[in-house]
Amino acid sequence: MKTVLVVDDSPTIQRTLSFMLRRMGHNALTAPNGIEALNQLEANKIDIIISDINMPEMDGWTLLTTVRERSDFHHIPIVLLTDSGEWQQDNRNEGADAFLTKPISSHQLMGKISHLAAD
């Protein structure tokens, strides 16, 4: 069982992904933006981060960069959530471990989490 941090400014996405993760046997924590995600990282042992790219206050790209720069967090796998493949047009994606395009099926989520949890 892994602890997965879901970072998205949509409460609906937070609830949906948390529900899917719990059904898969994982713990799920949530944060509405990158700043709150960093607070969760400080307070909890997080095994995997799933983060939206477009969020207020601190977006997913900034969160990705910040996590990768911190020696205490840089090892944590990060899955970025995108709308319509926007990451394909962005050259900042080299630090992410995986990408998922919304809407996300439970099958897609299970595949990514199972792969990252095995590493």
Image (spheres, grey):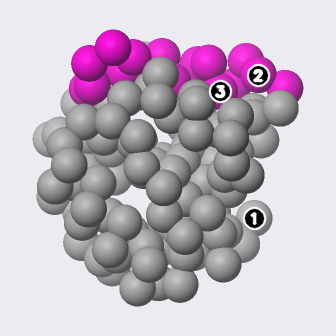
Task: State yes or no: discs 3 and 2 in contact (Cβ < 8 Å).
Answer: yes
Disc 1 versus disc 2: distance between alpha carbons?
A: 20 Å
Disc 3 versus disc 1: distance between alpha carbons?
A: 18 Å
Most distant residue in the front direction: 43
Q: Which residues are magenta?
A: 54-71
Q: Is residue 36 left or right of residue 106?
A: right
Q: Is residue 104 above or below residue 13?
A: below
Q: Is residue 72 left or right of residue 22?
A: right
According to the picture, the residue beneath numbered tag 1 turns out to be 119
Secondary element at tag 1: loop
Q: Nearer the viewer, residue 69 or 14?
A: 14
According to the picture, the residue beneath numbered tag 3 turns out to be 67
Q: Nearer the viewer, residue 44 or 77?
A: 44
Q: Is residue 72 above or below residue 100?
A: above
Observer able to see residue 88: no
Where residue 60 appears, as percent x and y from the top left, is: 40, 27
Report the residue at 24% width, 36% height from top: 9
Where residue 36 appears, as percent x and y from the top left, is: 47, 29
Q: Is residue 79 above or below residue 69?
A: below
Q: Circle 1: is it few (<14), some (14-19), or many (20+) Cα within 10 Å? A: few
Q: Is 63 colored magenta in this rendering?
A: yes
Report the residue at 19% width, 43% height from top: 10
Front label number (3 vs 1): 3
According to the picture, the residue beneath numbered tag 2 turns out to be 70
Q: Quadrant of residue 56?
A: top left
Secondary element at tag 3: helix
Report the residue at 42% width, 49% height from top: 30
Q: Amino acid at mark 3?
A: Val
Report the residue at 29% width, 54% height from top: 14
Task: State yes or no: discs 1 and 2 in contact (Cβ < 8 Å).
Answer: no
